[in-house]
Image: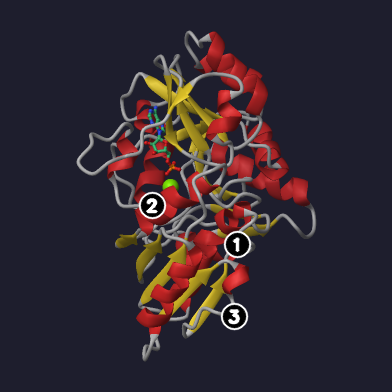
Amino acid sequence: MAINTLVLDLETGDRLSKLQIAAESIKKGGIVVFPTETVYGLGANALDGDAVGKIFTAKGRPADNPLIAHFSSFEAARPYIKNMSAGANLLAKAFMPGPLTLVVNKGEGISDNATCGLGTVGIRIPSNADARDFLALSGVPIVAPSANVSGRPSPTAPSHVINDMDGKVDVILLGGACEFGVESTVVDCSKEPFELLRPGAVSLSDLRRFAYVEHHDAGEGQKPKSPGMKYQHYKPSASVIALDCPHEAAVGIINSGCAGTTGTAALVFEEFLDSAKAPLVLSLGSAKDPSQAAKKLFALLRECDLAGMGRIYAMCPSDEGIGLAYRNRLFKAADNIIS
Ligand code: AMP
Ligand code: MG
């Protein structure tokens, strides 16, 4: 059943009163889309199991995929955490607020609906000012997954959330394009050694300056380390071919694969915009700065769908820094990886 969604643009007019309206909706058990520095989130009061349930319905999210709890400050999170280790505290001090989620032992309060009955909870303190003010005004922890229909590319711009969530949620707060464009780095700190569950803008080398964090590449047939890892993710309607090879070789594959086609797109680094010959060629920004590719990836996948493309070729950066996050999202979206 369609809901009458209130859409509020935080970039015009009285920002504070719009945040207040959204916070009131949360207190009354509503669900609210809000901007963060990673991607747009779909939030509910983490203490209210019925409100949390509405998130799963709006997204079509599998019931065993736990949600991350967001707080306006680390102090606000403390009462909901049990026995946080010294190493986890170091990571929190270094990277919170910011695009990092720490999975820690769960204290009392957060609904079991949000953590899917696990004894752990993912904690995040966004750095985005709109998100933090919204959290502070709401006065409760807010659980929020990405504000997309489950399985589709995450929303990183206002048009994406309008497209996916208008008519399904109580309030949509619009705050422009997201700074990082990929979801938070997730580290499991509930066991030793810590383990990277999802790469993001806080890179492995950033983390390892403060604590040892293991990373295992998810191989075929491996048991998922976190419930969310077993599901299909980030997929546009078009089929996606990831080109995990030298960029010159990728151009060759694009040019032979696109010859004579009309519905094929290529996502290439800007250094190759002239040499790639596809009906639709879109820029990932410079190969020297993979943060641009990470920021643009989900938006470009959606743009290819809107343009009616049936197939998308996409170049890859190396796995250094945020390149690991780009590769993780692209490979999950891909039907085929050519290396
Ligand atoms: P999303 O909310 O869709 O951005 O995804 C959140 C990710 O964090 C998913 O991969 C979840 O499985 C993972 N996650 C959230 N809470 C926990 C937890 N308590 N333990 C392990 N993984 C978690
Ligand atoms: Mg998601």
Placement of 142 over or under 241, stated as above or below: above
Q: Which is more foreground, mark 2 or mark 3?
A: 3
The label on residue 59 is 2
Label placed on residue 312 = none
Give 168 or 1, whichever is nearer the viewer: 168
Q: Residues within 10 Å of mark 1 (few under 14, many from 20)?
A: some
Whether disc 1's CB lies below 8 Å from ligand 2 is answered: no
Q: Quadrant of residue 110?
A: top left
Residue 225 seen by the camera: yes
**Residue at image location 50% in from the left, 15% down from the top:** 81
Distance of label 1 from label 3 (alpha carbons): 30 Å
Disc 2 Cβ-to-ligand 2 distance below 8 Å: no
Q: Tell me how far mark 2 sits from mark 1, CA to CA.
A: 17 Å
Q: Does label 2 or label 1 sit earlier along the sequence? A: 2
Residue 61 or residue 88, whichever sits in front: 88
Residue 263, image quadrant: bottom left
At 35% from the left and 38% from the top, the residue drawn is: 217
State the residue position of label 1. Answer: 158
Q: Point out the tag, 2 or 3, that comes first from the N-terminus.
A: 2
- Amino acid identity at mark 3: Asp
Dot 1 and dot 3 residues touching (CB under 8 Å): no
Tags 2 and 1 in contact by the CB under 8 Å rule?
no
> What is the three-letter code of the residue carrying label 1?
Pro
Q: Residue at x 30, y 35 (%)?
A: 227
Q: Residue at x 51, y 42 (%)?
A: 43
The numbered disc on residue 274 is 3
Q: Position of residue 264 (x, y in %)?
A: 40, 80
Q: Nearer the viewer, residue 49 or 333?
A: 333
Looking at marks 1 and 3 on the same chain, the residue that comes earlier in the sequence is marked by: 1
- Asked if disc 2 and disc 3 are in contact, CB closer than 8 Å, the reply is no
Type of the residue with mark 2: Lys
